[in-house]
Image (cartoon, rainbow, N blue to C red):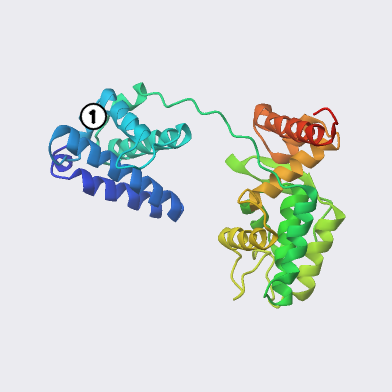
Amino acid sequence: MSGASATSADDALAGWLTQLAHERRASPRTVEAYGAIGRAYLAFLAKHRGGALSAADLAGVGAAEVRAFLAFRRTGENDKPGLSARSLSQSLSALRTFHRFLDQRLGLENAALALVKGPKVRPGLPRPVSEDQARGLIAEVAESDLDDWEVARDQAVLTLLWGCGLRISEGLSLTRADAPLPETLRITGKGGKTRITPVLPAVREAVDAYLAVLPFALEPKDALFRAKRGGPLSPRHVQASMQRLRGRLGLSERATPHALRHSFATHLLGAGADLRVIQDLLGHASLSTTQRYTQVDAAALLGAYNAAHPRA
């Protein structure tokens, strides 16, 4: 505790962010977001208490102070809009992680965080792209200023995400030993949960076309999809590629790589697939997560009705 009393709150925050980046391998975006929340938290407490804080002071932060900080963030300041319920929930989650670090590394336990409840957050509906939009995105890759093998690669990746309902991380985790793709793939998703997903002929053909022009020799354990200089393809490349494609096609920001996974589910649902089957294919732990797609499908049905019915 003596070491903690000599440590400033700012230094403790810096140590936490270092742990997130180097030990927990958090993404740069997560570290940046958590850092912004942590700095706002310490600045609020310093103003509230009338002076700079030590790390030891953070052990005495009460539930009322945390609630006051969240209320302050909700209302906003200096003409800045307040945070949404979802952002406030994320802020509270970050603070709990920060205080857990203080407890584990500096012995500064704070039980007050457990008494603070975050705002209720209604889960947002999935945002799929239509079948025509998905086909258009894949076709538009051919108009990119890329080498032929890169065009084939990007088309293969997007076809894989849409045709198998994979997350980006799952698609990019495939190795050379996985191709040519079999009729089914064993995918390890969130939480180490394993699932089996069928591979459509169109997906297999797209990956085969990519391999036929790939200029790099790969070992069986090497990542299947490669970047321009031969290293493993990054999720950021896929996201940036989709951003350029949707811009050229005039699609909204909702047209993300993950939207192709949503499209996989809504297209199956629209074709009459059982909800439990879709749950298994997506690897959802809870059926309630999969049930959100029924709301999307119902919304699309209502939209078509309103557009077509003469009395709408």
Q: In this view of the protein, which residue sits in the foreground, 226 or 300?
A: 300
Where does the image place residue 143, in percent across and percent down from the top left?
A: 73, 71
156 to the left or right of 100: right
Q: Which residue is mark 1?
A: 61
Note whether residue 290 is visible. yes
The residue lying furthest to the front in this view is: 311
Q: Residue at x 67, y 62 (%)?
A: 245
Report the residue that reaches farthest toward the top.
115
Residue 56 in view of the camera: no
- Residue 66 is left or right of residue 261, and the answer is left
Frontmost residue, 163 versus 199: 163
Marks counted in the figure total 1
Rate crowding at label 1 as few (under 14), some (14 to 19) or many (20 or more) other CA atoms within 10 Å.
Answer: some
82 over 258 or under it: above or below: above
Q: Is residue 297 above or below residue 211?
A: above
Question: Does residue 268 sit above or below 152 in this rendering?
Answer: above
The image quadrant where one finds the C terminus is top right
* Residue 125 picture location, percent across and down: 64, 35
Residue 209 point in image, percent of width and height: 81, 68
On the rendered image, what quadrant is the N terminus found in?
Answer: top left
Mark 1 falls on what kind of element? loop
Q: Quadrant of residue 4?
A: top left
Residue ID at (21%, 43%): 9
Which quarter of the figure has residue 67? top left
Q: Quadrant of residue 158?
A: bottom right
Disc 1 residue type (three-letter): Val
Image coords of residue 239 (percent x, y): 60, 58
The structure residue drawn at horizontal position 74% and vertical position 76%, both measured from the top left corner, is 148
Residue displayed at 62% across by 60% down? 238
